Amino acid sequence: MSARKRLNPDELRSHRYLGPDDLRSFGHRSRQKQSGFATEEFAGRPVVGILNTWNDLISCHAHFRQRAEEVKRGVWQAGGFPVEIPVMGLSETFMKPTSMYYRNFLAMETEEVLRTYPIDAAVLMGGCDKTTPALLMGALSADVPSIVMPGGPMNRTSWRGEPLASGTDVWKYWAERGAGRLSCDSWCELEDHIAASPGHCMTMGTASTMTALAESMGMCLSGASSVPATHSGHSRMAAATGRAAVEIGWHDLRPSQILTRQAVENGVTALMALGGSTNAIVHLMALAGRSSVQLSLEDFDEISQRTPVLANLRPTGKYVMGDFYEAGGLRALLARISDLLHLDAETVEFRTLGDSIDGAESYDDDVIRIRENPVCETGSLAVLRGNLAPNGCVIKPAAAEADLLQHRGPAVVFRDYPDLKARIDDPTLELTRDHVIVLQNAGPLGAPGIPEWGMLPLPKYLLEQGVRDMVRISDARMSGTSYGACVLHVSPESFAGGPLAVVRTGDMIRLDVAARTLDLEISAAEMQQRLSEWQAPEPRFSRGYGKLYEEQTTQSHEGCDFRFLHDDGSSPPPPAIY
Ligand code: FES
């Protein structure tokens, strides 16, 4: 445990509000008393802000009101003063155009809530996809001591004797329905079973990935991210998180001290060993963009090429998070790749990552594979470049049909998502498995919000023939629960005049994942000619959040954060506001 100085009560940030003998502090104290608290309950002890992303439309967080009470229990036990603060819940299942459109909104809210209130430490209650990265981004920018309380995956479930996996099996059975092999009644029946309890998606989708990365980077209690949401251990973990929050408050242990380059590399290594979501790349780039940590797409590719996939979890593998927990969870996985990690990286528990995973065991070598028998030797995710994606794009080879990873085929181009929906099943297109489906205008600005459309649908007539994968290219993202030979996050995006905008139906496209290339087979002169003829679309928002988003959002390879929130670590702290 590192020797960090314990603050005196009058050095706490909250003391500025609650301690002085002046008019303002009189107001603060009197209003705490209005809430029924005596001075000795709130003054001279760390105030812990519990940022709760619960609302009635974010079913993954249905247990968060109870968990907030359990966090409070822990805070009281450790001698802190808990205050629960609702912040925007980013519901993956309900928000349009996509929850990603609002990730930066929650990040801003988090940063400003932490800045404006008398908070010495924060518990970040995240789970459903974008909540965890948004809370981390905001906490890092505010640089107030913070700890993540991961929401936990939902229960395992099954249907007609077959285990079900969130998202992944929705896509699978939707394809079966498209192929005419699943009736409407069966599809409706599936609806009753696919999400069987509170908790986030129980595959290694974006939610499981991001909470696991928070733990790998030292931002939550060791072992916390694997605990299922309805397990009694989840309540105990919530209380323990509250107790830990008091300690990081007393010692002013800040996110900037935890989220170092080493910690972020640990996160990327865990991402690869988990076979985690492609979305994590965008989120980690955004997180790094708010600090002095230098991170590039090539870092992901380099770490991918030296890291085996050991977690046999859907969509890449066979099992779901409940199995992972029972097999030993993230600690066991990290112990199996300990030689690839920076073990001396510090965590919110005032110890090193190496100490956190010391002695962790795996109890099922099929769920958490041994190094000699990985799910994939290396290359969970790959970063590609070429004349079609000068600033990079991403593919998840581990979740694609292997023969498509080196492919040359004619493009069929859809100008936007409505066009795709309207025409994909048109038999006159005469698509074959060799075609390359291209979707334009689905990126950060084009959609807007870079939605999870990247697992582009296959034509019904090919599904009926048994085709289940094709090369698909877009500037969109795809759900972490999705799969297929889907090239994603093409940057620059088509809406901003990237080369994807000038692909035409019939052009030949060459994908070579081993060589890390994606190219449109036209000459440089032809490319230049087409790009010079491209006309930028008119801005679509004249006011409000949309205007801010349109003017400030960066491209995928930069993390899609707002430009004005970037910080390479050299920005002076904001002025004190009285
Ligand atoms: Fe919330 Fe998947 S819908 S995590």
Image (cartoon, rainbow, N blue to C red):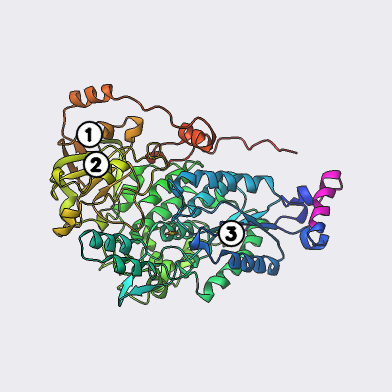
Front in this rendered view, residue 252 or 559: 559
What kind of element bears circle 2? strand
* In-front residue for pair 359/568: 568
Q: Residues within 10 Å of mark 2 (few under 14, many from 20)?
A: many
Residues under labels 2 and 3: Cα distance?
52 Å
Contact? badges 1 and 2 (CB < 8 Å): yes
Which residue is painted at 19% across and 40% down in the image? 412
Tell me, for residue 438, which label it has, or none. Answer: 2
| Tag shown at residue 503 | 1
Q: Which residues are magenta?
A: 19-32
> Quadrant of the image for the N terminus?
bottom right
- Please say whether residue 416 is visible from this viewpoint: yes
Q: Is residue 22 magenta?
A: yes
Residue at the spot 16% in from the left edge and 27% down from the top edge: 523
- The label nearer to you, 2 versus 3, is 2
* Residue under pointer 3: 2
Residue type pointed to by label 2:
Val
Q: Residues within 10 Å of mark 3 (few under 14, many from 20)?
A: few
As measured in the structure, the alpha-carbon distance from the residue carrying label 1 to the one carrying label 2 is 8 Å
Mark 3 CB near ligand 1 (8 Å cut): no
Between the residue at mark 3 and the residue at mark 1, the CA separation in whole angstroms equals: 55 Å
